[in-house]
Amino acid sequence: MESIYQHIYKACKKREKLLAVLIDPDKFAFSNTKSFVEKVNQSVATHVFVGGSTVAEHITEILVAEIKKHTQLPVVLFPGDVTQITDKADALLFLSLISGRNPEYLIGKHVESVSKLRKTQLEIIPTGYILVQNGKETAVQRITGTEPMPRNNIQNIVDTAVAGQFLGMKLIYLEAGSGALHPITSEIIQSVKRELNIPLIVGGGIRKKNQLDVAYKAGADLVVIGTAFEEDTSFFDAIKNH
């Protein structure tokens, strides 16, 4: 059976565009799960990501179990902390915050997670996570104590992404942050994509169909949208399956 990563990698090579809907357990009303996931199923979404910066323990597991009742799409953990690991999901992005220099988020949390991961059947996908300036402070900044990369120093962002690939990361994730004022620019996406041989994920600040199209056209293989759906589920109508 094809792994979730193999599917993403093959789609990248075929230039098929993927879309993940990010559900943050901290901001999501559990009672809305069924109706929300039905909208996801009717859209062009290919994955469901679950995670957030500050989520109480066990909440993620309960939510993932409920999501799985209503969709066949792969459910991938996008964890802000070790407490969000649950075997109810299909895979986990093993995120290393390579834009920052806090050792806790480069290796510390990863070591801490192994005792939990050892007991799961999760597919673990090493992911280089790069936070880029978006115009306001993000939860990732506050919690990790790291600064985002300046958006005008594109070469540094490119070099960081390539360094992640050289370190063995299977995905690079360019992140503007939840509720970002400005999404990742097409120039940054193009520049990074040009030098990568692995799939590129882009997220943060995408609230309109045309912004989604810009990210794809620039080279994003998988786009992640969260806040836009939380604030306005009519966005689903713009990206319905045809």
Image (cartoon, rainbow, N blue to C red):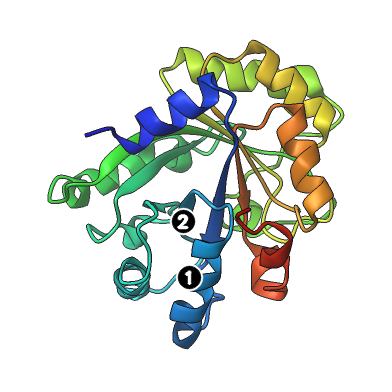
Three-letter amino acid code at the position of disc 2: Val
Label 1: which secondary element: helix
Q: Residue at x 71, y 24 (%)?
A: 157
According to the picture, the residue beneath numbered tag 2 turns out to be: 48
Q: Can you say whether 155 is above or below 121 in the image?
A: above
Q: Nearer the viewer, residue 175 or 43?
A: 43
Looking at the image, which residue is at 68% across and 52% down?
Answer: 177
Look at mark 1 in the image and give the residue it sits on. 37
Position of 165 with respect to 239 (left or right) is left
Q: Nearer the viewer, residue 209 or 140?
A: 209
Q: Earlier in the sequence, mark 2 or mark 1?
A: 1
Q: Which of the two residues, 186 or 109, is positioned nearer the viewer here?
A: 186
Give the image location of residue 205, x and y in percent.
75, 53
* Quarter of the image where one finds residue 39: bottom right
The answer to the question of whether label 2 and label 1 lie on touching residues, with beta carbons closer than 8 A, is: yes
Q: What residue is rendered at 49% in x and 63% in y? A: 41
Residue at 71%, 35% (x, y): give it. 216
Residue 17: % across, % down: 60, 36
Q: Amino acid at mark 1?
A: Val
Where in the figure is residue 65, as x and y percent of width and height? Answer: 29, 70
- Which of the pair 50/32 is nearer the observer? 32
How many numbered tags mark residues here?
2
For residue 22, the mark is none
Above or below residue 50? Residue 74 is above
Q: Residue at the front extreme?
A: 242
Expressed as whole percent of the image width and height from the top left, the position of residue 202 reads: 65, 39
The quadrant the N terminus occupies is: top left
